[in-house]
Amino acid sequence: MTSHRSVLLILTECILWADTIHCMDLPTINFYRNNAKEVAERYESVVNDLSKHFSDAFNTGRKVLDIGCGSGRDLALLQKLGYECYGVDPTQQFVQIAQEIHPELKNRIIQDSLPDLSVPFDGEFDAVLCSAVLMHIEVDQLPDAAKAIKACLKVGGRLLFSVPSKRLDVFSENRDQNGRLFVPNQANRLKSIFEELGFKTVSSWGNSDSMGRDAVAWESVLMELKTR
């Protein structure tokens, strides 16, 4: 468990770093960096409830980017389903662990993150998956994050994202006891931002928590890029 003093030190580091780098929330990244092995084991022990929608959301055989791919669990499943898969993650630890757990993903994952994501793997993706990531980005950085996602997609490409609709373990300043950022009410805010960028909402639905936590529930949104 991260102490309040440790969280304060991490927040201070983030403020200093943010002067030079437009980064995803650093305390959140630090939690995953320092606990990557344990978190990866937890991810790999369950099936993402969102995954049952992959085949309906994305046409088989298309090029898919998983932003914030973590342990590589969803990427590996997508590859088994016949997609051409690539991933990015903010933590080098996850980049390494994902390729160790799933050797078939070797050289298909690199370190990078929103909001200033560079278009990876030559871009032109038919689909982007962003599962349980966008709640870790401050509201004022969401437009830049959305533009970065758009830049990765072809016109007609699809975006599937999930964010919490309920998170009862989040306290002051939208952070949990480990210092991770969980900005509430992101789904509708994100839909509006993406629609302004030329996306159209295809569907949205609620998901139960894959890890069985009563204090957590999710909203998933499928969108399609209609205009460049």
Image (spheres, rainbow, N blue to C red):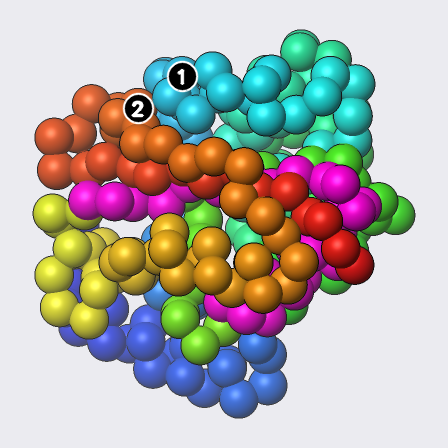
Q: Which mark is residue 132?
A: none
Q: Secondary structure at mark 1?
A: loop
Does residue 76 appear in the picture of this structure? Answer: no
Instruction: Tell me if residue 149 is in the magenta stretch.
Output: yes
Stretch in magenta: 142-166
Q: Would you say 33 lies left or right of 122 here? A: left
Between discs 1 and 2, the one toward the N terminus: 1
Dot 1, how many residues are within 10 Å of its Cα: few (below 14), some (14-19), or many (20+)? some
Disc 1 vs disc 2: Cβ atoms closer than 8 Å?
yes
Residue at the image position 40 percent from the left and 70 percent from the top:
138
Q: Position of residue 21 (x, y in %)?
A: 59, 79
Q: Which mark is residue 210?
A: 2
Quarter of the figure with residue 30: bottom left
Does residue 49 appear in the picture of this structure? Answer: yes
- Amino acid type indicated by mark 2: Ser
Q: Nearer the viewer, residue 69 or 196?
A: 196
Q: Which mark is residue 47?
A: 1
Residue at the image position 31 percent from the left and 28 percent from the top:
207
